[in-house]
């Protein structure tokens, strides 16, 4: 499982509140990704990181920000959560020269 | 961006049957991966296969990059094969002198294997 954990695993929050999801890896991989999974949309890339303090936007980045102050942690923040951000969020890492991706267990977020 | 289309969207099998899942993509890719999402939501990487053929037990995959498609074969299916199968592709690009990929996923094929 490439040593990837996500926290929390489940969260229910209210519209307008800030939320931070954490992805932690233990194997010192350089590249990390945040995806969201919604019915009818598959998985879509939110943000990614190619090193400490090096991040960039993905396909659906509006309303999200990320930070990576240490190699092992990649944080996803919803500054002011909306109901449209109710989703399952997956973190992934790229391993090896082939960019083979391995996923964490996911976080189910519900915004009421 | 690259479009990824998977077929069929749903597939129902009896245990022991064989199946073929297809992934079409709209542009040249340097990276193609197949994933299985089990009924508990965990995503498992099955193959990294931007071209050629690979086999892993009862599963095998073939990618014909020049014709922009990939096939995933499941033989002698088991109930544990149930779940959603995703194809994902990317090109590569440079940041800070190092290349890496961003995956674009297809919608998936929902496979149900009955005992």
Image (cartoon, grey):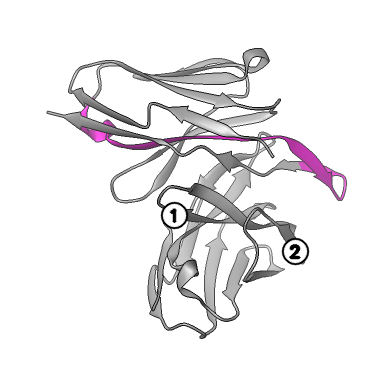
Residue B9 image position (x, y, % from top left) = 37, 32
Between marks 2 and 1 in the image, the one whose residue lies nearer the viewer: 1
Decide if residue A112 is in sight here. yes
Residue B91 lies in the magenta-colored region: yes
Provide the secondary structure element on which disc 1 rests. Answer: strand
Residues shaded magenta: B78-99
> In this figure, which residue is indicated by the disc labeled 2?
A52
Q: Looking at the picture, do discs 2 and 1 lie on one chain?
A: yes
Using the numbered discs, state the Cα–Cα distance from disc 2 to disc 1 in whole angstroms: 29 Å
Q: Looking at the image, is mark 2 or mark 1 earlier in the sequence?
A: 1
Return the mark for residue A19: none
Q: Toward the viewer: B55 or A17?
A: A17
Residue B105 image position (x, y, % from top left) = 54, 40
Placement of A86 over or under B23, stated as above or below: below
Residue A102 lies in the magenta-colored region: no
Magenta span: helix, strand or loop, mainly? strand
Q: Is residue A43 left or right of residue A9?
A: right
Placement of A76 over or under A46, stated as above or below: below
Residue B5 image position (x, y, % from top left) = 52, 31
Kindly check if marks 2 and 1 are in contact, taking CB atoms under 8 A apart as contact: no
Chain of the residue on which disc 1 is drawn: A
> In this figure, which residue is indicated by the disc labeled 1?
A38
Residue displayed at 25% across by 22% down:
B77
So how many labels did they put on this image? 2
Residue displayed at 75% across by 37% down:
B92
Q: Residues within 10 Å of mark 1 (few under 14, many from 20)?
A: some
Residue displayed at 66% across by 69% down:
A66
Question: In which image quadrant can residue B78 be found?
Answer: top left
- Quarter of the picture containing the N terminus of chain B is top right
Residue A70 image position (x, y, % from top left) = 69, 68
Chain of the residue on which disc 2 is drawn: A
Q: Residue furthest left?
A: B115
């Amino acid at each position: 499982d490439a040593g990837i954990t996500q926290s929390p695993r489940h969260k229910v929050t209210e519209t307008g509140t800030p939320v931070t999801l954490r992805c932690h890896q233990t194997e010192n991989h350089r590249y990390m990704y945040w995806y969201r999974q919604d019915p009818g949309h598959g998985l879509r890339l939110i943000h990614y990181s190619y090193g400490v303090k090096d991040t960039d936007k993905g396909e659906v980045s509006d309303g999200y920000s990320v930070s990576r102050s240490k190699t092992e942690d990649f944080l996803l923040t919803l500054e002011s959560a909306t109901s449209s951000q109710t989703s399952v969020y997956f973190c992934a890492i790229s391993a090896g020269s082939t960019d083979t991706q391995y996923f964490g267990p996911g976080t189910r977020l519900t915004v009421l | 961006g690259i479009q990824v289309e998977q077929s069929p969207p749903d597939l129902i099998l009896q245990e022991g049957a064989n199946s073929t899942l297809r992934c079409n993509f709209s542009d040249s890719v340097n990276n193609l991966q197949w994933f299985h999402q089990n009924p508990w939501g965990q995503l498992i990487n099955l193959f990294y296969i931007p071209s050629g053929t690979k086999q892993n037990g009862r599963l095998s995959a073939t990618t014909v990059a020049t014709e922009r498609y990939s096939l995933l074969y499941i033989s002698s299916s088991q109930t544990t094969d149930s779940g959603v199968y995703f194809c994902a592709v990317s090109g590569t690009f440079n940041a800070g002198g190092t290349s890496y990929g961003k995956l674009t996923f297809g919608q998936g094929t929902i496979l149900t294997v009955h005992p």
